[in-house]
Amino acid sequence: MLPFSPPRIDQKTIDEVTKVLLSGWITTGPRTKEFEKKITEYIGCRKTICFNSATAGMELILRWFGVQEGDEVIVPAYTYCATANIVMHCGAKPVMVDIDPKDFNISVTEIRKHITSKTKVIIPVDISGWPADYSEINALVKEPGMRDLFQAKTEEQKKLGRILVMSDAAHSIGAMYQGKRHGSTTDVSVFSFHAVKNLTTAEGGAVCMDLPAEFDCDAIYSTLNMKSLHGQSKDALAKSQVGAWRYDVMEPGYKCNMMDIQAAIGLVELERYEENLQRRKEIFDFYTNAFKNKSWAIIPAYKDDQKESSYHLYCLRIKGATESQRDAIMQGIFDRGVSVNVHFQPLPILTVYKTRGYKMSDYPEAWAKYQNEISLPVYFDLTNENLKTVTDAVIAAVEELVDGLKG
């Protein structure tokens, strides 16, 4: 079976991890700090801090900003559950909105309809690595009417004076938006380094801050670092210095720091990331060339004059297919020795949200895309022979199993 998305682990990665294991320092330390610095340089943002997951990073930003019970946070209905789960962890309400007809990302028109005086944060999601419409979203939250509607409760909210925009950029490290690396395109962007992501640290994530100039990002870094270490005033590296053992605990925090073992993997991945992106683009082009003349194929967008994807997921859609037909096509692909996936099941069909009153019928665009989407394998080590196996399997499964879709 051709796998869906294995990590790129080779001898160089193994050697760097081994160095950390033999160094005497394996938790948060010099390699984590170096990784944060290099991400900041690569992205072009003001400051970066790494955690053990993107989810943890997003939640800590919500908590830093003071999101609490009674608040609302706008999220797309089409995303992974983490985007909304973190809102509920803070006691706030996820306000789900539909996606844009032109892609898989949140609709700015729908965002506008759902902003209230309770809205504190908007979380756009870059599905498949394709950036959301940040220029429009940034402009929306800065409109005088939206600023007047905003009700600040905390010092951070008063200082910003408007809704915070936090990009769930789990898929999109390396993407471009209006000539800039994504991650320097809105207030905060959070990348994932989970095992299946383009750039992995096995588990992990990075919060990239590009807040307005009046915010001290070094101070925010220290606050987030403290929150990630049980509220402790010093991390292990600082405490290890001679005579520096004493510390304080400032609040009941969390435990979600990144380790140097993880950062060692990330440093290797980042060093060769442009090579990775180039190969992923070649894979996207291969798939597009194979499917572009098929009447049933809806090809995903991945480059235009404003945006360029990180080439994380190739979200092929089967025109006219129902959910059950899509599932049958996927089984046909599996039967031909190729692993595929679906990204994502919309939040309202999941029990945790369905039982809280969210209804899939309120999000017709999300349903329309979900029911006929199939994610194809994309990773560095795929050969062109492998890609031919994938495209042959997809074409055969569609044209054999679904009547009326030949072409």
Image: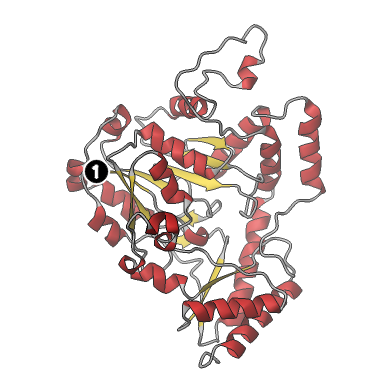
In front of the other: 399 or 280:
399
The amino acid beneath tag 1 is Lys
Quadrant occupied by the N terminus: bottom right
The residue that appears at 40% across and 34% down in the rendered structure is 63
In front of the other: 229 or 263:
229
The residue that appears at 66% across and 44% down in the rendered structure is 201
Total tally of numbered discs in the picture: 1
Q: Quadrant of residue 262?
A: top right
Q: Is residue 37 left or right of residue 220?
A: right
Residue 219, image x, y percentages: 44, 24
The residue that appears at 41% across and 50% down in the rendered structure is 84
In front of the other: 251 or 60:
251
Residue 125, image x, y percentages: 44, 55
The residue that appears at 29% across and 56% down in the rendered structure is 111
Q: Quadrant of residue 288?
A: bottom right
Which residue is tagged 1? 118
Q: Assign a secondary structure to mark 1.
A: loop
CA neighbours of label 1 inside 10 A, class few (<14), some (14 to 19), many (20+): some
Q: Is residue 51 left or right of residue 382?
A: left
